[in-house]
Amino acid sequence: MRKILSVCFCLLLAACASQPQNQGLETTDNGDPIEGINRATFEFNYFLDGLLLNPVGALYRDLPPPAVRTAMDNVLKNLDEPMNFANTLLQGDVDQAGVTLMRFLINSTVGLLGMIDIAADWDLPYRDEDFGQTLAVWGMGDSGYVVLPVLGPSTSRDSIGRLVDFFADPFRYIAHHNDEESWIYGRSILNAASLKAKTIEPLKDIEQNSVDFYASVRSLYKQRRNFLIENKETLGKHQQDVEASLQPGSGSKLNLSLNESGSITSLAQ
């Protein structure tokens, strides 16, 4: 884990250092200052996907009955609510913070520890918030695109946000307090399996219809992040599933855009 974090930190430093520099070389304005390194990392992640993550995601998708899988997904979302609540408050959105708090209280009790999303049926919609979005709301500009080993697409800003969310998550401290490190590992494995199960087929479809898979994933990631920062409510399910686990690595060129409902619109070039 320390080695992975060290590599990620070095990539972030490279992205930050490279972004403002233009040494007279011909470049494209794609917000990807270390594209060569990113493509290599993307290829590594793609290999890891095929070797480990895709098989795990397929097992998660095919083995549990749909009702059981839905319950597990709901529990994972409910565990994210404390950080959603904190980031919503930090962004100054008191109304949504109240909705998120009510969701957590209702689903943790009436919803049987989050297994049933009762709050959604009571017109309390889920909203994914993180510290990367909070930094954007606070005025921190978009930064260089970076592909992190194992973790996948990010930016310098989002990587800082991810690190803050990881260390601030109360679930982590509860697990440490109870000497149950296995809770943290179990949650991480289930999250990875759940996200991968939803993205295997959409990503395969994008790869098959793309000339530059890497560029397609980069475009999709940036569009999804903009949707989240702007709190657009109706992200299309297909688009949500694809972005949720954007951490493969190959090559393709596909024009990807989001329509008004947040769904993917793609035109192959």
Image (tube, rainbow, N blue to C red):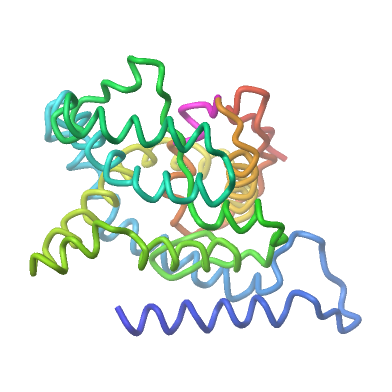
Q: What quarter of the picture does the C terminus occupy?
A: top right
- Is 237 within the magenta? yes
In this view of the protein, which residue sits in the foreground, 88 or 63?
A: 88
Residue 57: horizontal and vertical position, in percent?
A: 25, 45
User: Would you identify the image quadrant in which residue 150 lies?
Assistant: bottom left
- The residue shown at (45%, 82%) is 7
- The residue shown at (21%, 49%) is 190
Q: Indicate left or right for 56 with 26 as reference.
A: left
User: Would you identify the image quadrant in which residue 72 lies?
Assistant: top left
Vertical order, 117 against 28 (above or below): above
- Is 224 within the magenta? no
Magenta region: 234-240
In this view of the protein, which residue sits in the foreground, 192 or 51?
A: 192
Vertical order, 96 against 118 (above or below): below
Vertical order, 212 against 48 (above or below): above
Q: Indicate left or right for 239 with 244 as reference.
A: right
Residue 70: horizontal and vertical position, in percent?
A: 22, 29
In this view, the residue farthest toward the right is 24
Q: What quarter of the picture does the N terminus occupy?
A: bottom left
- The residue shown at (39%, 40%) is 199
In this view, the residue farthest toward the left is 179
Residue 200: horizontal and vertical position, in percent?
A: 36, 41
- The residue shown at (64%, 29%) is 265
